[in-house]
Structure formats: C-alpha cells, structure tokens
Image (cartoon, grey):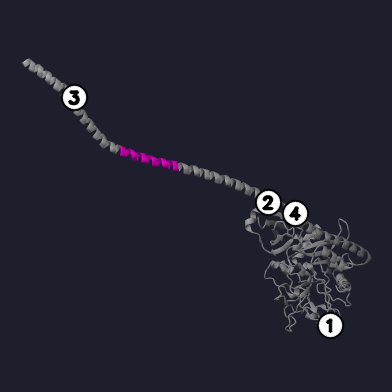
Amino acid sequence: MSEEVNTSGAKVGSEDVNTDAPEVGSNDMNTGAAENETATVAETGLDNSSKTDGEILEKNERGDKTICNFKTIFCSVLLVLAIALVLFFYLRYRREKSKAFLDTFRAQVSQMELNIDSNVDAAFTSLSGLSISTTSVVKRLAEETDYPPGFINIPDVAQTLGEAKNTSNALVIAYVPKVLSENFELWKSYSKTHSSWIAEEQPGGPMNVTPEIIDSVWEFMDYNWEYSDRRLIDEIGDGMPRMGLRGNEPSRKLNNRVIERLSDGSGKEEQHRRVLNVEDENFELKEEDYDYFRFDDKDDDDYFEFDDDFEIGPSAILKAPRSDGFWTPVWQLAPVPILDETDPFAQVINYNLRDRIVFSHAVDYLERYRKPIFLDICDQSSWFLNYEYSDILQTAVVHPVFDDISENSAIVGYHVAVIPWIEFFKSNRGPDSMDMIVVMQNTCGEQFSVELKGKNVTILGETDEHDPKFDAYQIHTNFAEQYIGPEHEGCVYTMIFYPTEI
C-alpha cells in the first residue's frame, strides 16, 4: 500500500509535479517574464524610440545645415570666382581701352606738336627773312652814306614790315637800331631829318605834313600812373580826361601832352628797369638823376630843351641816361603810327625799348648768342603805345640785324614782332579730333591754358584749367625747343597736354 502510494504518489507526484506543475509553472513564469519583458520593453521602448527620433531629427537638421552651408560656401566660391573672372576681363578691357586711348591721344599730341612747331618756325622764318633783307639795306647804305651801320630807312616800310607782320600773324613788328654811345648825338640828327617816312607811309596815302617826334632817345619816368576805365588822368587841368595814344586835343602844343600808362607784364616787370636794378625797395627817383624834357610852347622845333626846373608828374618822360653803353630806339614799325594833320605827333619814335626790363634781358641774350629769342607773356604791343590789343595774351620774338652776311658780323639793330599766343596753336585739326587742354608753363613763373576743340582755339586764362581727374593721361613736351639758347636763358616753356574726356 505504502509502496503503491509512494509509487503511486511518486508517480503521481512525479507526473503532476514534474510534468504538469513545472510545465504550468514554466509557462506561467515564461509568460510572466515575457510579459514583464514586454512591459519593460514597452516602457523602455517608447523612451528609446522617442530619443532616436529626436536624435535623428537633430542629426537631420545638422545635416541640412551642413549641406546648406556647403551649398552657400560653394555658391559663394562660384560667385567670387565669377566676380573675379568678370573683374579680370573688365580690368583687362579697361586696360586695353585705356592703352588704346592713350596711344590715340599721344598720336594726336604728337601731331599737335608738329603743328605748333610749324607755326613757330613760320614766325621765326619770317623774321629771319626780314633780317636778311634789312641787313642788305644796312650794308648798301653804309657804303653810300656816312652814317653808322644800322642808321637806315627800310624802303616801302609799310609793305616790307607789313608783309612780315602778316606772315607771322604779328600784332606789331618794328625795326629798332642799336645806337652806340659815341653815335648818340648823331642819331638825334638822323632821326629828326629822316622821319618823313611816317607821313609818306600813312594808310590813306602820303600826308603833306612834317611829322613831329621826340628827337632824342627817351624813356618813361615810371609806370605807376593812375587811370580808370581806360581813361587818362586830367593832366591838363580842364576837367576833360584825355583818350587815345597821344592824350591831347588837336592844336594843343607839346606842353599839354599826357601819356597813357604802359603795362606789359606781371609784377614789377612793368616798372622802370633802373628802378628794378636798385636793391633798396624804398629807393626813389630824384630830379638830379635824369635829364628832363621841357615841353615848350615856342614856335621853333626845339620842344625838348633840357630844364632842371621841370615839374615831375605822372606823365613825365626823360632822356635816356648817357651812362648806357647803347640804346635801342623805336624807329620804323608796322602798323605805321597814324598822324593827325593838325597835330602830327608820333610819340613812340625814339622810345628806348631797353627801358623795358624784358627787352633789356632779350638784348643781353642776343649780344651773347646772336640768335633770336622768345620773350615772356606780356602786353608787348603797349611798348609801341598800341593799346588796342591789351586783352590779347602776347609774346614777342626778337631777331638780330647784322651789318653783313658773315659769321662774325656785328649786330646793328633788332626786329621785334609781337605775336598773340593763340597763333601758335592754330591748326587744321579735323572735327573728330580729341578735345584737349594745353597748360603752358615757363621758367619765369608764368602759365596759361589753351583749349583745343577741333580747329577752334581758345585761351582760357593765365591759370591752370585742366581737370585733375585726367592727370594720369598728361603728356609733357617742350615748346619751341629749337629756339632755346645754349644756357637755357630767357623763359623756357613747357607744354602739358590733357584730354578733356575719355
């Protein structure tokens, strides 16, 4: 019984416990574990899934930003490369265009230089030809008369000097003899007895009058005379300002003469050369330093007797000091001084041009180098008491006259041609030529600007009128370099060309 029970129990227990219970327990445990694992997984799985999506999203965002940044950098690089490429070709184009413009501008400047040189050569050639013909007259008359070489009357002077005047486009052209100190008194006699050419060469034909001249070489007292609106001061005292070159009314005698103030240059160059040679700026001229003319009312011809009691006034003139080694009196000129039948006074005759500091320097230059010379920027026409051209920018060319056609011939006189600066810049430039501005500068501290538009030439004034934005295109060249002296004396000119547009 017991054995059965045990066996049975064992069997039963064994079967129940070992087969059923464990299987049930195992399943239950497995199921529970599975359920617990599932719950755990479910609980943890939600968190893990949520974290993964955030990370993915964050990673995606970071990826998008990276891609976007890459694209931006790539596009920026492409843009920079494109800009650099465009800039490269643009700068290359600009450089090529600028080079082409500069080449064209340089070519036109070179052509303009040739035109200017041609105009300058024409003026100098005209004076050179006149000097040669005058030298022939000097040589012939020196053989036929007892007067010193240079004491001449050029035949048909209105035509002879007039032709040279027209060829050189001069305003005034004159013959000025060189009168040595030993011939001073002889010149007084010669000029007085040979002044008939003035009446014979009048524009309207010969005039039946005897010209009146100051027969001694004379100078001005000073150049600081007052006048306003081109009217002369009332020197006569009758309340009427005097107009014109002589400053006197018909029938008035020489004691009534009023002389208009000269003005030929800038600064102190318009003053008396002897004043300029004095170092003391407070120096004043004294009566005893000069011989003065007395304008007398006598009926005889001696209007200019020396008088120590002459009253110095703003129109005072004086005899050229005898201390000078030689004098250069104005003698023959074109246009011929116009005479008034009732008062045939030709004041300009015998005015000593060396009284002008500019001309004095020019004469010293010619004495050393025997070559023609340019003068500075002045109103040189006023030297000849011609005020019609005072508003025109001028220069003068001085050419020596010799006593013979030989290498060592002596200088016996000078031809002086007053030429407007504008004449040197005229040319046959076409209407399509580049517009340009030429700034003229010289070593005498002067300057002026010239505007070139096609064939039109305009003097803009005595200033530098170019536009600084064209400085990169400026071209420097010398003016009339072929006529500069060995030591570069006188006023040496430089031209600076600028375009006015690109």
Give the mark nearest the N terminus, 4 or 3.
3
Mark 4–mark 3 CB contact (< 8 Å): no
For the point 37% across and 41% down, the residue is 58
Residue marked by disc 1: 298
Residue marked by disc 2: 102
| Residue 56 belongs to magenta span | yes
Q: Quadrant of residue 158?
A: bottom right
Up-down relation of residue 482 to residue 188 (above or below):
above
Q: Is residue 88 visible?
A: yes
Residue marked by disc 4: 111
* Horizontal and vertical percent position of residue 496: 69, 56
Nearer to us: label 4 or label 3: 3
Nearer to us: label 1 or label 4: 4
* Horizontal and vertical percent position of residue 461: 69, 65
In this rendered view, identify the residue nearer to me: 106 or 39.
Answer: 39
For the point 31% across and 37% down, the residue is 49
Q: Is residue 487 visible?
A: no
Relative placement, left or right, of 140 versus 385 is right
| Residue 249 belongs to magenta span | no
Q: Could you classify mark 1 by the number of other residues whose Cα lies within 10 Å: few (under 14), some (14-19), or many (20 or more)?
A: few
Residue marked by disc 3: 23
Q: Which residues are magenta?
A: 49-68
